[in-house]
Image (tube, grey):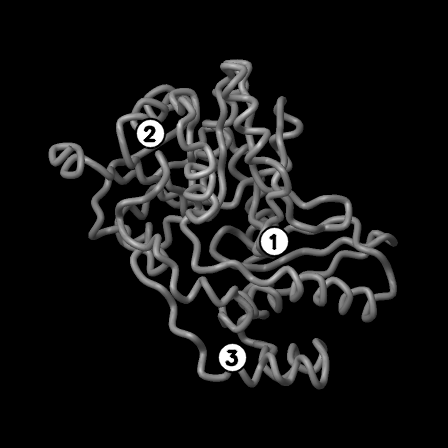
Amino acid sequence: MIEEEKEYPKYYAVKHKEFSERIESRSGGFFSALSNYILEKKGIVYGCLLDSSFVAIHARATNKDECKLFRGSKYVQSNLKDVYKCVREDLSNNLFVLFSGTSCQIDGLKRYLNGIDLTKLLLVDIICQGVPSPLIWDEYKKSLKRRYGEDLIKVDFRDKKKYGWGAHVLSFTFGGKKVINSSKFADLFYSHFCIRPTCYYCPYKGEHRPSDISLADFWGIDKVIPSFNDDNGVSLVLINNEKGQLYFNLVNNQIEYVKTELAYCIQPPLVENFNIPNQRERFWEDYRKKGFDYVLKKYIKFNLKQRIKWEIKSLFRKKTQE
């Protein structure tokens, strides 16, 4: 046991060889490589998607088309529904299973499956800094409808195609095909006003994870391996144990990767909790008394310089892709 703790975790910068897989993913597309392998083994993949009402839920996938809905970011707490029970049934039927989620969801699943053979279960957690309240996401959708007068038909939590991996811009498509781009919900997320109270005291920080493999964006890649970054996404992959290493080896023909070290890839959400914002209580008090549009305007300021920077970047990307 001591020897294993010294050997793991291992750290890799990863990007999928297929550009189409990577551009639709949050970072480097490593999850797609894993899920494709599980599906080839006639297995089942569980992940988070947005349903027809753009509510984040966990769901079960048996083919690549269903798995595509798991790709990309969903910056909101997901409803697990009955997926733990489904995972147990799939394992009882001797199927390979990949379950992806936050660290707390992974740990909850392991506790639920206590006593079950987990040999065919691959656990992949997302290194997160906290999950926003579904209430706030619902309020934001309502705010968009009030402003634009149309129903949403598509949401992209990070529009890499237009703005690149480094920018955190959301795109919203409405019934009349009008598309608007905004960072306001991302700004809410990064303000930490609306993440769940328990997330400020998350017990899953640090190197030793409850999963077999951990995934994150490899922010800071330019300081470590600048030639590896083309602004279309790079995954930071932590291999946490022998099972994780086995699956990494099984899919490494689908990816480009470079081994790195902890000192070069520390992300704040990996090692520490964020402090409770000084104005958090006031934010929620203002919300209860004056509504969502008021707090959005009061606490999230429009950044003109940032917007101009993104639009210039968008034009540059469009020109290079022509």
Mark yes or no: residue 322 visible. no
Residue highlighted by disc 2: 244
Identity of the residue drawn at 59% across and 35% down: 83
User: Where is the C terminus found, in terms of image quarters?
Assistant: top right
Measure the alpha-carbon separation of dots 2 and 1.
28 Å
Asked if labels 3 and 2 touch by Cβ distance under 8 angstroms, the answer is: no
Amino acid type assigned to the residue bearing label 3 in the image: Arg
Query: Residue 297 at what x, y percent from top left?
Result: 66, 81
Q: Nearer the viewer, residue 316 or 197?
A: 197
Q: Residue furthest front?
A: 115
| Real-space CA distance between mark 3 and mark 1, rounded to the nearest whole angstrom | 24 Å
- Percent position of residue 156, x then y: 65, 50
Q: Is residue 311 left or right of residue 227?
A: right
Mark 2 against mark 1, which lies toward the viewer? 2
Amino acid carrying label 2: it is Gly
Asked whether, in this view, residue 116 is left or right of residue 54, the answer is: left
Numbered circle sitting on residue 157: 1
Location of residue 106 (image quadrant): top left
Which mark identifies residue 280?
A: 3
Element type where label 3 sits in the image: helix
Q: Nearer the viewer, residue 214 or 13?
A: 214
- 2 or 1: tag closer to the N-terminus: 1
Question: Within the image, what quadrant is residue 246 found in?
Answer: top left
User: In the drawing, what numbered circle is on residue 202?
Assistant: none
Q: Position of residue 108 (x, y in %)?
A: 46, 43
